[in-house]
Image (cartoon, coloured by chain):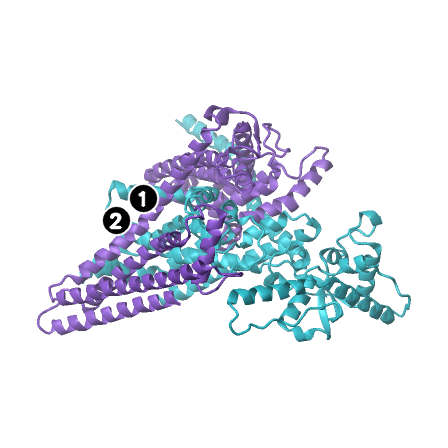
Amino acid sequence: MTEALETEAEANTRRRAQVRKSLSRRNRAEKRFKMLGLGSVLAAMAFVAVLFGNILTNGLPAFWQFNIDAEVYFDPEIINVPEVPVQQAGQSDADFRAEMLGWQRRLAMVNWNRILVSSVEGALAEAETADGAGTVTEIDTRSAQSIIDSGARFVLRDMVLADPTIIGERREMQLLLSADGDNWAKGKLSRDLPDDRQQLSRAARDAIDLLTEEGIVHRAFAWHIFTNVDSRSSPASAGLAGAFVGSFYMMLVVILLAVPIGVSSAIYLEEFAPKNPFTDLIEVNINNLAAVPSIVFGLLGAAVFINIFHLPLSAPLVGGLVLTLMTLPTIIIATRSALRAVPPSLRQAALGIGASKTQMVFHHVLPVTYPGILTASILGVAQALGETAPLLLIGMNAFVANVPATPMDQSAALPVQIYLWQGNENRNFFEERTFAAIIVLLALMILLNALAIWLRGRLERKA
Amino acid sequence: MTSVLIAALALILMGVAYQQGVSRSRALAGASRLHSRPQYHGAFLALWATVPLLFVLLIWVVTSGMIQDWYIASQIPAEILPGTTEYASAAARLRNIASGFGVAGEIAPWEAEAGEGLARFMTILRLSIVALGALLGVAGLLVMRARLSPRLRARNHVETVIKTVLIFCSIVAILTTIGIVVSLVTETVRFFTYVSPVDFFFGTVWNPGYSTTSNEASGSYGMLPLLAGTVMISAIAMLVALPVGLMSAIWLTQYATPRLRNVIKPVIEVLAGIPTIVYGFFALVTVGPALSAFGDFIGFGINATSALTAGIVMGIMIIPFISSLSDDIIRQVPRAMRDGSLGLGATKSETIRMVIVPAALPGIVGAILLAVSRAIGETMIVVLAAGNAPILRFDPTEPVSTFTVTIVTALTGDADFASPQSLVAFALGLTLFVITLMLNIGALVIVRKYREQYE
């Protein structure tokens, strides 16, 4: 008896010793596992940090571009155009337009570059006097021209177009430096490269250095990124205005179509639909649509909207329609879960005091779900705003240098503009510009999400 | 201008009808109790007044272009043959004269006459259409107003209309699917008239030839190199996303304090909201060169645009997807199982590895399938960072091509829509659609089964 007890006690001690021995190993494994988990979380957070850090450090400098302060003389000898035509009585609109176009063509043919070159020469002379060196560096026409953004020609032309009396006057103006000039001033181009591998001539480089030293060439916030349209001939003044408006139209279409259709569809499926094979079909369908790759919606758009209905290529209307179909499942699913979260007691109470089913849904259930529906809609719109692939397939990879006047006009969109800019041959300049466009897109998306959170908070407090 | 007027007309009609319905039913209410509240009588009348008007306008919008073309065709002299450029320009001139904009150059007498005739014709037609719509609306209003009575089930009628609208909205989703399937299948069938399905599905060479003279298929359209590229990139993405996503989900659900969790989870989910074009550019500009430099450092050639670059960045994109799905699934494991294991003396990690993860495994597998389907269909990252080299090889450091990249290049090029070079995009799209559909259905089945197990 005692013997047996002893062995049991011994066995217990042995077991305890065994457990204790393994305990440290198990604790070490526990610690390792926990560290692994923490490491993963940290890695994920590090990705976020690297991504945003990378985008911000690369993109922010693009918002400040180098400008040159120069006096522009609207030389009447160079701008030798006749008087502006005025519509005569009895002249048809078409004839007047033809005459006006003829005048504008004359204006466009003016050698604006000569005006710009003399402005640069003036600025250089000023810099040299300020520098005190007194040595007049000769600058050839080509070099002088390469310093200033070629879009400046159109700025001057538009000034004359807006006010022809300006001819013969002198104006102090701030002109953008060309893409190469901006690169050089920002120090993005190596100064050690030999002349034949530099994009700018030695004279132009020296001129920029001198002008920068004297503060005549200086950084200024590049508002034109927001107000100009895309441009190939004058990259330095290329902007996002067309893309903004294009994206705006598309979001308008999405909001006007996807939100009402999505919410109605969710209401029907969640509140009215009888349980039958047809409803099941719709359900399975929506779940599958939500997981269909976005590019397939682009194929649908190309085959149906473009090829069968002959809607215009690259139009925000078509883009909006494709994005509507794409975001519809997201909005439906989110709205349904918002409806599902409404307590049944609310429904029973409404029905109990004699409300019809429709009244119950629209007067009692729906108002409670406004915050949820709103969040779902905004998130759907944000998703649509960043989508690129389907837009490429409906012709939006085209270069468009216009602000679309209607949703039927050719247009760019923000994500597509990013795609186009990343493909630009002038990598040195456009890499930064692409990051800038990404910052703008992300800022818009963050704004939308913040709006969703804010509205949600407000509405929920009210409810 | 006219559209504003028409909209105003419709609104006025609607308002008047609503007001009439409300006031008339109120008057009736004196005699006996109403079946429906006055607002429903108002809405009932408003519907009867505006729906006919909108219906007529809809028909007009659809047919007006055809009617105009028909009228123009009747005016253009017979010697200008339809279908020629002269015909098109003559028609355009007529339209411009009719709109009052005028045309440049001499206006032939017949043009002036026809243009004026067209303007008159269209104005009369437009006015009569609006008048017809308004007449129908007013008629609907008057007839139905006479039928208002206390017993009228106005609410039921209005609710039927609402319900019909709701059903139509639900059908949009079905129509979308039908549209996708029909358009993909018809274009794919068209593609298979040029290239045999066997060559397409089992060919190992992707080299579509471009001929400018005909739409004949020249070159080979074997999709296996694209499939290999797609699978390789998705596999790399999963190798990145799965461990990080799953371990993050485990740490967040099992170890993190609620406060920490509420901060970290949204930060990780930021990754899910970033547009894919941003990831693509990040891969192209930052990750690719970094990987290439790293390859040089360890003496191993890595291309800047390669399956590896695209795969890693895609993996980063998918992390939040895996982590939030696994998060939900892990939380669904009954607490009793966890507590039982801990009560028996298992450490937390042992509980997770031996109890929670096995219990959540089917759900996690479902999540993985969904993530794979997303990786396969992902476009912009691979378009920018995978290098677009449709060659059958299994080296992740080399450029590859995928289904999605090829779809984009096929449809954004200059090829005619009806040429095999463009149509192949639809065959690839259909393949992609079927693959993702099967993955999604598989995931849904697994997740549903798993839910039933614990509910």
SS under mark 2: loop
> Would you call the spot at circle 2 few (<14 residues within 10 Å), some (14-19), or many (20 or more)?
some
Going by the numbered disc 1, the residue's amino acid type is Ile
> Would you call the spot at circle 1 few (<14 residues within 10 Å), some (14-19), or many (20 or more)?
some
- Residue of label 1: A282
Disc 1 and disc 2 on one polypeptide chain: yes
- In front of the other: B47 or B2: B2
**Position in image of residue A345 (x %, y %):** 25, 58
- Left or right: residue B292 versus residue B428 is right
Going by the numbered disc 2, the residue's amino acid type is Ala
- Alpha carbon separation for disc pair 1 and 2: 10 Å
- Rendered image: mark on residue A320: none
Q: Chain of mark 2?
A: A
Residue at left offset 52%, top offset 25%: B203
Question: Which image quarter is the C terminus of chain A in?
Answer: bottom left
The colour with which the image depicts chain B is: purple
- In front of the other: B204 or A290: B204
- Rendered image: mark on residue A273: 2
The colour with which the image depicts chain A is: cyan
Q: Would you say the residues marked 1 and 2 are in contact, meaning their CB atoms lie under 8 Å apart? A: yes
Q: Is residue A55 above or below residue B33?
A: above
**Position in image of residue B362 (x %, y %):** 41, 35
Residue at left offset 70%, top offset 32%: B300
Does residue A452 appear in this view? no
- Left or right: residue A357 versus residue B386 is left
Which of marks 2 and 1 precedes in the sequence?
2
Does residue B449 appear in this view? yes
Q: Chain of mark 1?
A: A
